[in-house]
Amino acid sequence: MATDGEPGLQVRPRGGHWMDVPQLPGALIVNIGDCLMRWTNDIYVSTTHRVLPPLRTRHSVAFFLDPNPESLIAALPGTGAPVYPPVRAVDYLRSRLESTAPDEAEPEEAGEAKGQAAGLAS
């Protein structure tokens, strides 16, 4: 991401506290995602990040890239003994998306639960 001089992006290193990402003229900020972290066998690690509300108008353009769905996500050569088992990109992405979705009961189960909560169950 190209910076525009407006602060607000923060990262939280593992086990650490939130810290501001420095604004360096002409610099690009690259957030390493969990998939690239797996490929590099934890040589590059992903970090939790957030953006604080701006004091002035801020412009940023984010670009997200996923590998070909059939690509094998496995430790790259030269990165040591694999930390993670190999997985197809489509399966990895699906597991990441499913882990963020709220658990949903089947519609009938949800209705039954509401009725029970309201004391309407027989």
Image (cartoon, rainbow, N blue to C red):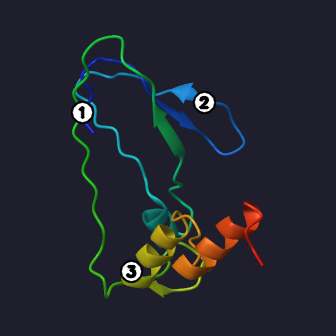
Q: Is 121 on the left-hand or right-hand side of 114?
A: right
Q: Which residue is mark 2?
A: 18
Does label 2 or label 3 sit earlier along the sequence? 2
Quadrant in which residue 67 is drawn: bottom left
Which amino acid lies under the numbered mark 3 shown in the image of this protein?
Ala
Residue 47 location in percent, x, y? 54, 47
Is 44 situated above or below 116?
A: above
| Residue drawn where x is 51% and y is 65% of the image | 101
The residue under label 2 is which amino acid type? Trp
Give the SS element for disc 3: helix
For marks 1 and 2, the one nearer the N-term is: 2
How many numbered tags mark residues here? Answer: 3
- 5 and 62: which is toward the camera: 62
Q: Quadrant of the N terminus?
A: top left
Residue bearing the label numbered 3: 89
Query: Mark 1 touching mark 2, by CB under 8 A?
Result: no
Check contact, mark 2 vs mark 3: CB within 8 A: no
The first of marks 3 and 1 along the sequence is 1
SS at circle 1: loop
Q: Give percent across and percent down for residue 25.
A: 26, 21
Q: Between 10 and 44, which is closer to the camera in this rendering?
A: 10
Query: Would you name the residue on which mark 1 appears?
Result: 60
Q: Callout 1, which amino acid?
A: Ser
Drawn side of residue 113 relative to residue 4, left or right: right
Mark 2 neighbour density, 10 Å: few (under 14) some (14–19) many (20 or more): some
